[in-house]
Image (cartoon, rainbow, N blue to C red):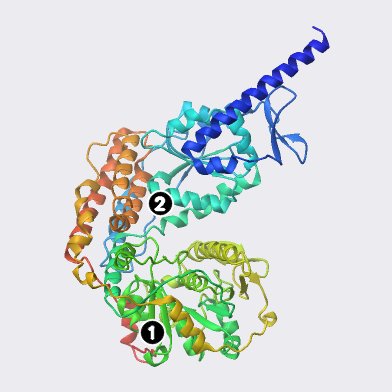
């Protein structure tokens, strides 16, 4: 065969290949338009620039990096994918999350004591598991899609219930639309009990937010065993897995639980009956006055003189226990923020500061805060908290007016305070005492903090949560270079602060945030030495505060509220008591997951928002622990033993919470802080209440 003829044949083959890839692209695009419109919109007019589909020297469809002019795959993409699937089958490492014991702060609560009992009994037994990847996979994280050959191979070999696909490079996913037929894949995950999630073209942290959304929707039990298939070694895909493994654990502690939700519902009910205002968020506007968010971290001590000298130039918004530290320094904040719902916070405030000091301070809080806390201040306003049972009650009460929930307000009071500041429109914010780390092992809060008196009052065998002494050390980048020691609760709070600041920067281009603390570095918060802070003009504080209240404090009377009864409000909650219990006949892993899926769907938000909020967190962690200790046991008898153990504890817990809900549907928390009770009995503690 002549060289000219060979050239013609190669051209014909290329033309045929171009036609096939073009037809495949059009087919896939039409498919995604129907099934995943957001993906269709992302690629409808996409033009690849950095990475493009090409035919390599061996005649394989490949990806070529336009900058380096090199092929992404150094061998056949299909053969490489098959080798990866073979290796995954034999040598993959499972990521197993744990549901640990939790400290009990209120012995009257049901969830933590009962979950701890189950966890403790599970610690006496363990089920043997194989090292190889099981055939039934509840959750598979595929990081890096490439041309996608590995996906149908994985579906042929495994029974995959939930698939999460992360591809940072839009050009790469665009190429896959030309190469593989996505219809069988999407059809597979259309089957009952399965799901597929696409996360394309975003950074790893935004991808993690989508994982968290998936957990909320599907249940924590679907992520207790996570299998990771790493197709590419691109930095972003590697970072995603690292961030997933290090930060997704924090979500376990933030799903809410029955006692919290029931108390929040009760507090919402009673706060609605009070004369206090509810926080409203009208059309977004910017305020350019300087506002300081003041938390109780060690760095607060370095800022006390600055706050005194500039108290007439900046609005001061204190957070939680910082109130007492400011009081002892002779500084009165303009606003104070609280978010904890338990009565212990009321007890702390009354012990730590005198009523005379608080009468000129306005409290900003969440609707779930104890009613008596609101009565400790000269004025008070509560915002609607996201993902809380009481939120539905408040929304129904304020119909037809729509209240916006205060997003980004968890997990600590610093998050809540900054959320208030952002939603009030402040675009010139100074973070003070928000360390999110421990610069010095001897100091975990401001030196003025009541925490140190409380530590001194401890006796042998007693522990004190606020010292973080029982937490594992983490190390993060410090604000002015180097690293700083921190712990999980502080680190979770910092990550949430960064998400809020990311929102604020996008919402308001002129938004600025200064961080002059010696704690952790915070993305979007500019590290600045206190001596370099700009001077600001004197504020007309009374007029500014009046304007804020006129804009955001809303009073509304709804006579229909008096007719609300617990039977009417909780009708759907009571109706599902029997159906949320675990049934007896569960023969294997897949049947267990299907049963947990059934109950999770039974209490979905679509069924009833209040039922969902009251049950979702407790169910998630009970189910998570049952899956952690039962799934993938090699011995069927061990599987049944572990499952029966969990079912016994879980079903008993369900009976107890329904007894509590019927007896005290709108219960107000009244359990005091025991350590403060003991300190009151001693002389010379300086208690104010």
Q: Are marks 1 and 2 in contact (CB under 8 Å)?
A: no
| Percent of width and height locating residue 349 | 38, 82
Mark 1: give few (<14), some (14-19) or many (20+) Cα within 10 Å: some
Q: Is residue 296 in view? A: yes
Res. 451 visible in picture: no
Query: Which is nearer the eye, 317 or 73?
Result: 317
Q: Is residue 41 left or right of residue 576?
A: right
The quadrant the C terminus occupies is bottom left
Q: Is residue 13 left or right of residue 248?
A: right
Read off the residue under disc 2.
Answer: 216
The outermost residue toward the top is 1
Helix, strand or loop under label 1: strand
Which of the two residues, 90 or 361, is positioned nearer the viewer here? 361
Quarter of the rendering containing residue 238 = top right
Image spot of residue 270 (x, y percent): 27, 74
**Toward which corner of the image does residue 314 lie, by quadrant?**
bottom right
From the viewer's perspective, is residue 136 above or below residue 387? above
Rate crowding at label 2 as few (under 14), some (14 to 19) or many (20 or more) other CA atoms within 10 Å. some
Position of residue 473 measured from the top left corner of the image (x, y, whole percent)? 53, 62
Q: CA–CA distance between discs 1 and 2? A: 36 Å
Name above or below for residue 377 compared with residue 67. below
User: Mark 1 highlights which residue?
Assistant: 379
């Amino acid at each position: 065969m002549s060289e000219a003829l060979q050239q013609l044949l190669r051209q014909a083959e290329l033309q045929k290949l171009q036609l096939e890839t073009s037809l495949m692209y059009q087919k896939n695009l039409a498919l995604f338009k129907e099934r995943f419109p957001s993906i269709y919109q992302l690629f409808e007019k996409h033009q690849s620039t950095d990475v493009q589909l090409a035919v390599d020297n061996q005649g394989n469809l490949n990806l070529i990096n336009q900058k380096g002019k090199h092929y992404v795959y150094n061998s056949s993409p299909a053969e490489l994918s098959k080798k990866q699937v073979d290796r995954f089958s034999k040598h993959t490492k499972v990521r197993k999350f744990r549901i640990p014991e939790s400290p009990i702060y209120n012995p009257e609560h049901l969830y933590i004591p009962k979950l701890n009992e189950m966890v403790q009994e599970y610690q006496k037994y363990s089920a043997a598991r194989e090292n190889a990847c099981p055939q039934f996979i509840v959750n598979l994280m595929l990081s890096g899609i490439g041309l996608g050959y590995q996906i149908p191979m994985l579906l042929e070999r495994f029974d995959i219930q939930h698939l999460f696909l992360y591809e940072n490079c839009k050009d790469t996913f665009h190429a896959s639309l030309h190469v593989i037929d996505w219809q069988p894949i999407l059809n597979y995950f259309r089957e009952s009990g399965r799901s597929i999630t696409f996360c394309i073209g975003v950074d790893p942290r935004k991808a993690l937010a989508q994982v968290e959304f998936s957990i909320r929707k599907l249940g924590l039990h679907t992520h207790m065993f996570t299998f990771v298939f790493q197709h590419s070694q691109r930095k972003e895909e590697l970072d995603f897995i690292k961030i997933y493994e290090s930060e997704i654990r924090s979500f376990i502690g933030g799903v809410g639980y029955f006692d919290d939700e029931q108390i929040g519902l009760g507090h919402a009910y009673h706060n609605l009956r009070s004369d206090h205002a509810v926080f409203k968020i009208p059309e977004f506007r910017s305020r350019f006055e300087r506002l300081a968010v003041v938390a109780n971290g060690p760095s607060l001590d370095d800022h006390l003189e600055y706050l005194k000298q500039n108290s007439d130039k900046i609005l001061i918004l204190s957070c939680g226990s910082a109130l007492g530290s400011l009081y002892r320094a002779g500084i009165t904040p303009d606003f104070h923020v609280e978010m904890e719902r338990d009565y212990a916070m009321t007890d702390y405030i009354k012990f730590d500061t005198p009523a005379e000091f608080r009468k000129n301070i306005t409290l900003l809080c969440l609707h779930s805060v104890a009613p008596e806390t609101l009565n400790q201040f000269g004025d008070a306003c509560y915002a609607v908290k996201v993902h809380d049972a009481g939120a539905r009650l408040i929304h129904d009460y304020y119909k037809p007016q729509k209240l916006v929930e205060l997003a980004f307000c968890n997990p600590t009071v610093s998050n809540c305070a900054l959320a208030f500041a952002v939603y009030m429109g402040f675009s010139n914010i100074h973070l003070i005492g928000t360390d999110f780390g421990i610069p010095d092992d001897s100091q975990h809060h401001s030196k003025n903090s009541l925490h140190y008196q409380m530590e001194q009052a401890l006796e042998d065998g007693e522990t004190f949560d606020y010292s973080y002494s029982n937490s594992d050390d983490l190390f993060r980048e410090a604000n002015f270079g180097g690293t700083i020691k921190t712990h999980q609760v502080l680190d979770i709070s910092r990550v949430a602060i960064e998400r809020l600041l990311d929102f604020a920067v996008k919402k308001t281009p002129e938004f600025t945030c200064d961080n002059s603390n010696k704690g952790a570095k915070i993305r979007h918060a500019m590290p600045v030495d206190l001596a370099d802070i700009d001077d600001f003009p004197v504020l007309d504080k009374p007029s500014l505060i009046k304007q804020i209240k006129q804009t955001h404090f809303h009073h509304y009377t709804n006579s229909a509220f008096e007719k609300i009864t617990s039977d009417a409000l909780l009708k759907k909650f009571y109706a599902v008591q029997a159906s949320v219990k675990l049934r007896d006949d569960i023969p294997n892993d897949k049947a267990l997951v299907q049963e947990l899926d059934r109950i999770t769907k039974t209490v979905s938000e679509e069924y009833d928002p209040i039922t969902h909020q009251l049950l979702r967190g407790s169910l998630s962690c009970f189910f998570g622990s049952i899956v952690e200790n039962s799934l993938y046991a090699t011995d069927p008898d061990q599987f049944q033993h572990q499952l029966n153990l969990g079912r016994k504890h879980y079903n008993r817990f369900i009976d107890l919470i329904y007894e509590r809900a019927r007896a005290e549907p709108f219960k107000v928390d009244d359990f005091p802080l025991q350590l403060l009770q003991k300190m009151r009995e001693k002389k010379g503690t300086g208690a104010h209440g």
